Amino acid sequence: MYKDQELRQQARDAVEKKKAIVSSDPYRPIYHIAAPTGLINDPNGWVQWNGVYHLFYQWMPFKTDHGAKFWGHVSSQNLVDWQEEEIALTPSDWFDKDGCYSGSAIEHNGQLKLFYTGNVKNDGVRETYQCLAVSNDGIHFEKKGVQIELPEGFTAHFRDPKVWEQDGEYYMVIGAQTDKEEGAVVLYQSEDLSDWQFQGILAEGFGYMWECPDFFSLDGYDILLFSPQGLDANGIDYRNTYQSGYVIGSWQESFTFGEFHELDRGFEFYAPQTTIDDQGRRLLFGWMGVPDQEEEHHPTKNYSWMHQLTIPRELVLENGKIYQQPVAELMELRDELIVNQVGSVHTDIPKASELVLNEITSEKGYIKLFDYATIEFDQHKQTIRLTRPAFDDGELEERVGIMEGELTEIRLFIDHSSLEIFINGGEVVFTSRMFSDVSNRTLEVEAEGKLSIWSLKQKF
Ligand code: FRU
């Protein structure tokens, strides 16, 4: 208990001490959830409880690097305005002393329950425990300790429990690495959320570790979402250090599934987590980063913070593919309509804006932002290409997405140092950081189509 109080105080002190420098960063987002100070990564415990959205995240308050993670916490009534809450979990106990690693939330008997991984390292040897913390008010959590120990047949890379309820039973998927150093997702089952039965491997087949699994049904299909590590780049696929994607499957004797699809084509996207809300929407947040990718080159570390999350997105299944759309509530962010015209344009725009280009009639075209990121389309090849300078040497690098049919819409969410690109209502999505010259506000659109641009409101 004493350790927990001490860590909370140290984290609060760190935020207080760094507040001025963090908020002075011209790269600081104004409507995205970002590290208060230090480093954030995965969204965790994403849930709507008693009508309020609760989102937790992996947080290292003391440095812009990974380490013994805390769970930070924000809440919202409307997915647009967010309130900072007290720290939910600190790495204060023997079973989580080197990090309260990723996990999920579920409501049960009027309480909010968090399942997370206790990361422990003794003399460089990793141990992993699946742990529980419980709350009556959604703000203060009481740890209940270890619920599941590492089963035989797996290395200690066994983490990130995601729990859900189905037909009165509880299920949990965990990201795993087998003794043969192959990535997998395992399944547990419980009747009461406290006695868990190991059901074996749900899915495996490529890569050396699968992190952050999520399992849900969308439009009648079962989706397994996860972040595999160890895939080699292959043409336009798997270009980032680690991937994030999904398989669509069904239960017969076991879970059989089809091809692995990357969920996002951008440079920085990882460890997404979903929940279902009271309107029946499947909502997703992702981390706008990738482990072991370019972190030493993020300029924001000079301002004592690193990383942010994506905007909230709604998932729908169309033509056997997951579409990601910005949630409808984000229209609330629109401030002024600053461009509303047909055809090409060369102008200045604010660093926080939303752009929609639709009714596109040109065969080819491009959007160039802040002389930094270029989005090119080719109707004939059905390609969308995002190009930007690499963080380390400034050499141009690219990511490519393929559309099934015609390009009908490009929608951009721009927030100082981030860019989220939604093509054709979310058929292809690119999520990326963008460290353009802070004084450069230029926008070039070379395309025939209807262009609308809004400045966006500040929320943080
Ligand atoms: C994914 C991940 C998880 C782990 C957490 C630690 O980014 O490595 O597997 O629980 O981050 O912060």
Image (cartoon, grey):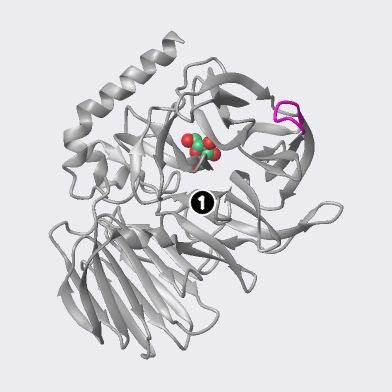
**What residue do we see at 41% from left, 40% from top?**
75
Query: Is any part of residue 279 visible from this angle?
Result: yes
- Magenta-drawn segment: 191-196
Give the camera-side residue of 365 and 407: 407
The secondary structure making up most of the magenta span is: loop
Q: Badge 1: few (under 14), some or many (20 or more) residues near its Cα, within 10 Å?
A: many
Q: Is residue 188 above or below residue 273?
A: above
- Coordinates of residue 432 in the picture (x, y in percent): 37, 58
Q: Which residue is mark 1?
A: 242
**What residue do we see at 25% from left, 36% from top?**
304
**What residue do we see at 24% from left, 46% from top?**
299
- Quadrant position of the C terminus in the picture: top left
- Coordinates of residue 356 in the picture (x, y in percent): 33, 74
34 inside magenta stretch: no
195 inside magenta stretch: yes
**What residue do we see at 20% from left, 81% from top?**
345
Residue reaching furthest to the top: 2
Give the camera-side residue of 130 and 108: 108
- Coordinates of residue 275 in the picture (x, y in percent): 56, 48
